[in-house]
Amino acid sequence: MPDDAIVAFDKMLRTLAAPAQSVRPVPGDSLPDCAMDDGQRREVAALMRVNHVGEICAQALYQGQALTSRDPSLRTSLEHAADEETEHLAWTAQRISELGGRTSLLNPLWYAGALGIGVVAGLAGDKWNLGFLAETERQVEAHLASHLERVPADDARTRAILDQMKQDEISHAETAVRLGAAELPAPVKGAMRLASKVMTTVAHRI
């Protein structure tokens, strides 16, 4: 347990303080940027800030779930998903910088809250842990789809990032189902949607 705590603390510092790295090329990196007025740039940067917060939360969720999972193969799957989410973290951070925006000032708070939720999900048992993962990814997929509708049609760089992130989240959900995810009760899904709404609303501004 002490070793796990040290690793967890190290991952937290890396997520919050160190620039995220991507093994895969950044989607759309070779595409030309489009012309946007100041209002459009601020809005797209705000949307990408929300997505960056989502990836901060994903890192913490997966870490909390992995810490309390009883199944070594599940921990491996969670760690693989976390690796891809780290890439998403790098992609969104780069796009925010290109747009002249900034990441959320509340990232440490988002991380702490998501870590606690992940620990609770893991303690509930592996099938519920997987169920929480699957439902989280479904809701993130829907969230990304809504952002694709709000981003200017000619902003190919942002759209390429969102498209690839959406495909990755679909894959994570499918993997969780394949590993035996339980279907979460409707009230739990509703609570997750409410928490997500609060996070996205605040992160859009702060």
Image (spheres, grey):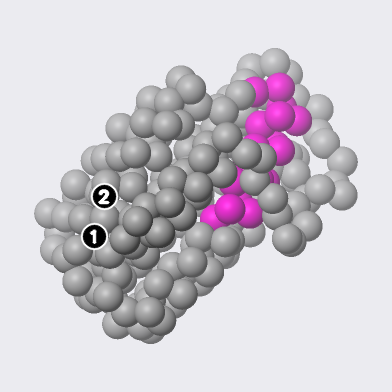
Secondary element at image label 2: helix
Span colored in magenta = 85-101
Viewer-closest of 190 and 62: 62
- Identify which residue is drawn at 42% across, 32% down: 108
Viewer-closest of 82 and 170: 82
Q: Give, as a three-letter code, the residue at label 2.
A: Ile
The stretch drawn in magenta includes residue 87: yes
Q: How far apart are marks 2 and 1 (CA)?
A: 6 Å
- Identify which residue is drawn at 56% across, 28% down: 103
Q: In this view, does 194 lie above or below 59?
A: above
Q: In this view, does 179 lie to the left or right of 52?
A: left
According to the picture, the residue beneath numbered tag 1 turns out to be: 121
Q: Give, as a three-letter code, the residue at label 1.
A: Ala
Viewer-closest of 203 and 116: 116
Marks 2 and 1 in Cβ contact (< 8 Å): yes
Secondary element at image label 1: helix
Quadrant housing residue 22: bottom right
The stretch drawn in magenta includes residue 103: no
According to the picture, the residue beneath numbered tag 2 turns out to be: 117
**Direction front: furthest residue:** 2
Classified by dominant secondary structure, the portion drawn in magenta counts as helix
Q: Is residue 148 above or below residue 121?
A: above
- Identify which residue is drawn at 48% across, 22% down: 105
- Residue 102 makes an appearance in the image: yes
Instruction: Identify the disc placed on residue 55.
Output: none
Quadrant housing residue 84: bottom right
Question: Residue 65 placed where, x, y %?
Answer: 33, 61
Question: Residue 149 placed where, x, y %?
Answer: 55, 43
- Identify which residue is drawn at 32% across, 79% down: 71
Q: In this view, does 150 lie above or below 174?
A: above
